Image (cartoon, rainbow, N blue to C red):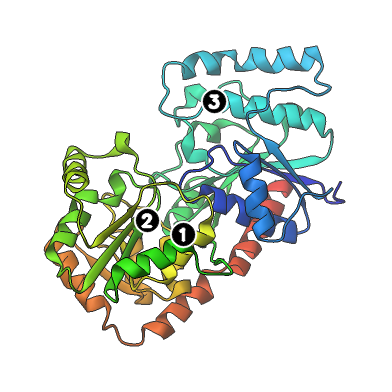
Amino acid sequence: MNKNGYILLYNPISNEGHLDSWHVLFIELVSKSGFGVIAVCNDPEGLRLKLKHKGIYESDHLVVLDATDRTTGPHSLLKKFWHRGNALYGRLMFRQRKTSLDPVLFFDRVNQLIDRYTGQIRLVFNMYVDAYPSDPQYWKNLSFLNSLPWVGLCITPGAHPSEGYYALQTYKGTCLLDEAICKTYQQEMPGRIFEFLPDITEIALPKQRSALANEILSFAAGRKIVFMGGSIGKQKNLARWYDLIGHCDQSQWFFVQMGRINTNNLTLEDESALKKIQDNPLENLFTYPEYVKDERVFNEIISISDVIFAVYRDFARSSNMLSKAAYFEKPILVAENCLMGQRVRRYKIGLEVDPNDSTSMYRGLKSLLNLDGIKDNFHHYRVDFNALAVQNKLSEFIHASLKS
């Protein structure tokens, strides 16, 4: 037991995008702020392995648990029926909508842990409140035992704070990755706490070069390597990505696509372009179509690349790919007229292009290799987007939430 009590860090989605690496980062940073951590997720063994890579192990100050574990400790029947009775309306309403996670399951599991760690959990932090339905009807009658306060991280916020959890008195506030939206939320909801967090990333690399990296370098054979990776859905702009590859001289450019493809989340144009590539593979395209569990390997492939492609479609929010660009010092190509574009323009770590025009992308790609003073620009970005900055803001947010 930590003398300052535990912060329960709940990650509702595992093995998807960079949510797991952010869970690890938050565990590390919250621990450094003096609190114990109870880390809850759907893949506890995977989380333990990621923590081990960083030299972090379970102890009295860090407990890793399964979000899907339905075993009960000393839960009294009275408490159990009280909570389930209050949650019944929310569960019935949720059955009508299955595009998001069920908030009842979140409350149910956390209440088990509140009962198990009686008086020791001080705050619950949901790492991805975007994953839940926003309509207030799904949040009616939901509460934690002992009216325990809770907060969340919202990666894809709307223009205004209208989500149903804001109606709950025990919900204290939200961390956001967009500074402008954070200010707007604070103005519109002065009774809540909103904190801007710099969008940082895991930057560790393997101790030795992997077979995968050697394979890619062998295939590239000295050509400039363009990297595109992560969770690949419609936002990754596959149709234009493949168009760009078609524009480029195969003798000079080599492309790497790394990450699991969400085939149920592509446009028709993306599906058509993907099928064409699958039927007629390109010599200058290397595809690794799996989720990369070890982010050190993901980082390694970025580190051997020359350019990062992040010209996402209809993507208004932040991306930690900018931090990867800055830390591994790789110029990045992004879409214009969006938050990523604003940051690239401000820090001059890459270029903005038209996300609907592969010709514009090709021009930008060629220009990326000739940007002046970019090493200094990468440094300036890292000054503002780093783990210490997040730790300070996160600590302030947690203490303010506890006081409120």
Nearer mark to the viewer, of 3 and 2: 2
Is label 3 or label 1 in front? 1
Can residue 308 be seen in the rendering of this structure?
A: no
Check disc 2 and report the residue beneath it.
229
Residue at x-position 50% and y-position 31%: 164
Residue found at x 38% / y 74%: 330
Above or below for 250 versus 286 = below
**Pick the front one: 303 or 342:** 303
Q: Return the residue at label 1.
A: 298
Determine the residue positioned at 31% across, 73% down.
Answer: 350
Quick check: marks 3 and 2 in contact, CB under 8 Å? no
Kindly indicate the quadrant of the structure image that contains residue 260: top left
Instruction: Give the Cα distance between marks 1 and 2.
Output: 8 Å
Inspect the image, locate mark 1, and give the three-letter code of the amino acid beneath it. Answer: Phe
As helix, strand or loop, the secondary structure at mark 3 comes to helix
Marks 3 and 1, Cα distance to the nearest angstrom? 37 Å
Residue at far bottom of view? 373
Cα–Cα gap, marks 3 and 2 = 35 Å
Q: Residue 331: percent from the left, percent from the top?
A: 34, 74
Give amino acid for label 2.
Gly
Tag 2, which secondary structure? strand
At x 56%, y 53%, the residue is 22
Q: Which numbered disc flags the more N-terminal residue, 3 or 2?
A: 3
Instruction: Identify the residue position indicated by label 3 in the image.
Output: 139
The reply, left or right, for residue 369 in relation to residue 171 is: left
**Given the image, on which type of amino acid does mark 3 rest?**
Trp
Mark 1–mark 2 CB contact (< 8 Å): yes
Q: Position of residue 77 (x, y in %)?
A: 79, 12
